[in-house]
Amino acid sequence: MEHLSHQDVVNLFLMLAAMLLLARVFAEIAQKFKQPAVVGELLAGILLGPTILGTFFPEFHETLFMSNPNANLALDGFVQIAVVLLLFIAGLEVELHLVWSQGKSALSISLLGLVVPFVLGFVFPYYFPEFFGLAEGDRLLFSLFMGTAMSITALPVVVRILMDLDLFKTKMGMLIVASAMVNDIIGWLIFSVILSFMGKAGNLSLMQTIGITLLFTFFMLTIGKFIINKALPWINKKLAWPGGVLSLSMAFCFMAAAFTEWLGIHAIFGAFLLGVALGDSEHMSERAKEIVHQFINNIFAPLFFVSIGLKINFFTNFDLLLTLAILVISFAGKIVGSGFGAYKGGFNVKESLAVGFGMNARGAMEIILGLIALENGLIGEKLFVALVIMAIVTSMSSGPLMKWSLKAAKEEQAAAT
């Protein structure tokens, strides 16, 4: 039986220490500049990876991150867990009753905010595959992935931006959050189906995989949610708090992740759905959610985002035209689609623009999506770098652009009265 050698263990601990330390330092710096912590954590990874450390101190970079394949394999295990837990807490943010309460308006914004960017993201890569970096492989699958990548919104980033702008509890805030929830569930379902098209479905046929995925989604959002809601009061009463909720929620998160990974659609989808079912329970207190969030956001999330920078040289893989094209498609698709949906729902032009800007935040979700596609050979490194830059730019710009458009809307209303 193989095991980590003494040197492997030393290297693994040093890698984890370096990643967590630098992630914390840069996250604090990013927050000082009113930016999401994820931006600082990504910069920490770029600094530790081949882009900076590997270029200027190649021997030190080689010793710390490249000399022990077994330690790197163990680190990959940590990163896989981090991805699953990140989608789990993204699911916890979803409140299904909020989606139903917003009704047609949320559905209109989320569907248009999904369809328009999906079409733009699909059409351009389909007709210009070489420009977008498809060297070999299925052009249809590649274009479907690009459409999905352009259409998913990062719910945790959206919630944070709305809280910062003091809009979370307003009608517009609730509408944006509800729309982002619907958007995310449909987007991840599409992406799961794309992965099954790539032959990740094991012994099951494609139709079996899709059918079971839809059944599992329906089960988790109805019967599964009901069972969790009935079991939580007993767990809170009989087991140590918050240990009981924490350990059992993690255990069931990993079970759901294992099930969807076995299906061949990726572990993250199971974790996301379990998070949705658990987070929507009236017995899952905000304090318990906060404990789970703190645990994952401050330990596992930094490891994942720093690991992005370790995988790729951002200088050598940076393509300006490709990055600009991705930015234009992402901004145009979300702002036009979600904005038009809001306009149809009764908002004026400036308010509709604010909704579009709010829905444009991509953040962690885009990066997770891109990394899975990269690891499965669906996209190349240049496109991955462009997607990471797009995720950062949209996350950083959503708040200020929303603020600007809402201020303009207020001034317009004041002038009219």
Image (spheres, rainbow, N blue to C red):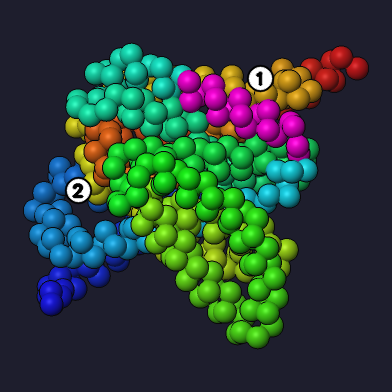
Q: Are marks 2 and 1 in contact (CB under 8 Å)?
A: no
Q: Could you say which is closer to the camera, residue 32 or residue 59?
A: 59
Q: Residues within 10 Å of mark 1 (few under 14, many from 20)?
A: many
Residue labelled with disc 1: 340
Give the distance between the C-alpha atoms of the residues marked 2 and 1, in whole angstroms: 45 Å
Residue 231 visible in the snapshot: yes
Report the side of 382 relative to 402 (left or right).
left
Q: Residue at x 54, y 50 (%)?
A: 215
Looking at the rendering, the stretch of residues picked out in magenta corresponds to 102-119
Q: Residue at x 25, y 49 (%)?
A: 310
Residue 6 drawn above or below residue 405: below
Residue 308 visible in the snapshot: no
Disc 1 is placed on an element classified as helix
Give the amino acid at mark 2.
Leu
Report the side of 328 relative to 183 (left or right).
left
Residue labelled with disc 2: 53
Q: Position of residue 278 (x, y in %)?
A: 61, 62
Q: Could you say which is closer to the camera, residue 32 or residue 271?
A: 271
Q: Position of residue 213 (x, y in %)?
A: 48, 48
Report the side of 129 relative to 347 (left or right).
left
Answer with mark 2 or mark 1, whichever residue precedes in sequence.
2
Q: Residue at x 61, y 84 (%)?
A: 239
| Image quadrant containing the C terminus | top right
Q: Residue at x 43, y 65 (%)?
A: 254
Give the amino acid at mark 1.
Phe
